[in-house]
Image (cartoon, grey):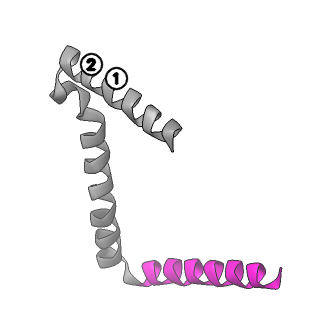
Amino acid sequence: MAARLWSLGAFLVALGIAAHLVGWDALLWIPRAAMDWLAWIPAAIIGAVRDAPATSGIILLGIILMVVARVMMRSRH
């Protein structure tokens, strides 16, 4: 537990120094870009389902079958 607290403290000190040197706006552009990208994924999925529902259904069925096969393999072992 002490090692984790030490690591967390060192991380926060480094984060604070970096924020002081370059500013929070420059420091947080990577998480903002990642969140924008992650928000784009559901919109793209919904658009694909609306454009081609049959194709999306086939893809979904394939994913379901793959998950079922993986569960069945794990339950055998």
Disc marking residue 14: 1
Q: Nearer the viewer, residue 47 or 34?
A: 34
Residue 66, magenta (yes or no)? yes
Q: Is residue 9 left or right of residue 40?
A: right
Residue at the (50%, 39%) spot, across then down: 2
Vertical position of residue 47 compared to residue 68: above or below: above
Where residue 53 sits in the image (x, y, percent)? 37, 82
Residue at the (30%, 72%) spot, across then down: 46
Residue 61, magenta (yes or no)? yes
Residue at the (68%, 82%) spot, across then down: 71
Q: Residues within 10 Å of mark 1 (few under 14, many from 20)?
A: few
Q: Nearer the viewer, residue 58 or 18?
A: 18
Amino acid type of the residue that numbered disc 2 sits on in the rendered structure:
Ile
Where residue 73 sits in the image (x, y, percent)? 77, 80
Please, what is the dominant secondary structure of the magenta stretch? helix
Q: Residues within 10 Å of mark 2 (few under 14, many from 20)?
A: few
Amino acid type of the residue that numbered disc 1 sits on in the rendered structure:
Ala
Q: Residue furthest right?
A: 77
Q: CA distance from mark 1 to mark 2?
A: 5 Å
Q: How many marks?
A: 2
- The quarter holding residue 14 reads top left
Which residues make up the magenta segment? 54-77
Dot 2: element:
helix
Q: Quadrant of the C terminus?
A: bottom right
Dot 1: element:
helix
Where residue 52 sits in the image (x, y, percent)? 37, 77
Q: Is residue 59 left or right of residue 36?
A: right
- The quarter holding residue 25 reads top left
Residue at the (31%, 65%) spot, across then down: 42
Q: Are marks 1 and 2 in contact (CB under 8 Å)?
A: yes
Q: Check disc 2 and report the residue beneath it.
A: 17
